[in-house]
Amino acid sequence: MQAMPGPARLDHLVVAARTLEEGAAWLEGRLGVGLLPGGEHPAFGTHNRLLSLGESYLEVIAVNPGAPAPPRPRWFGLDTPQMRERLAHGPALIHWVAAVPGLPDHPDVLALSRGENRWRLTVPASGELPGGGVEPSLIVWDTPAPPTRLPDSGVRLLTLRLGTPDPGPLRATLDALNFVGEVEVYEAPQPELSAQLQTPDGLVTL
């Protein structure tokens, strides 16, 4: 799917966990700063908490046990046996989202909301992660994006590293998006991603 011309940038990182409490405790222990309440996503039966990274942000997301099951697979692969097995070993950085100037009408582009927030996001009908998590989902905010409203945490993303067996197509995707940001693509046996963050207490890698 082609986004509208114009530079794309990193919007947010996605950390998933079996429960929101487990994910928040893990991140707060690693980063040394507290996360803020996010909210619920009625369309997917999930909820989140947030952390400002300056011009971008980080979310920790989990299935909301108090919400009804959605009529379609949950986003970010949260319904898949592979993701459930992965998260059984602990929370993990699983994906990232790039902000783009615009998106075409397409079945995979969903209009979503959480509280006062309104946005459009690419979500495959299968709910699976694009490229195993290393290819970004694309977002257009119709209300001010969270980084403009979240208090500064003192945490900054230095580099997002994306490993994939065939780096060429991923590099081509980022080039087509005119992506601007500190992203490193490299060859790896399977899709993997990590983020180096500067925190008030030093460098941390997720």
Image: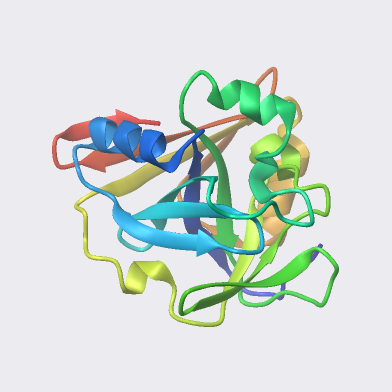
Rendered image quadrant of residue 171: top right
Q: Where is residue 102 in the image (x, y as percent from the top left)?
A: 67, 77
Whether residue 99 appears in this view of the structure is: yes
The residue sitting at 68% across, 55% down in the picture is 175
Report the side of 81 relative to 184 (left or right).
right
Q: Which of 43 and 111 is in front in this view?
A: 43
The mark tally for this picture is 0
Whether residue 187 appears in this view of the structure is: no
Q: Where is residue 79 in the image (x, y as percent from the top left)?
A: 70, 38
Report the side of 113 relative to 155 (left or right).
right
Report the side of 200 relative to 76 (left or right).
left
Report the side of 119 relative to 182 (left or right).
right
Vertical relation: 69 (above or below) 103: above
Vertical relation: 159 (above or below) 75: above
Q: Nearer the viewer, residue 175 or 9?
A: 9
| Colouring method of the image | rainbow
The residue sitting at 34% across, 40% down in the picture is 24
Q: Where is residue 90 in the image (x, y as percent from the top left)?
A: 46, 23
Rendered image quadrant of residue 201: top left
Vertical relation: 159 (above or below) 206: below
Rendered image quadrant of residue 196: top left
The residue sitting at 14% across, 42% down in the picture is 200
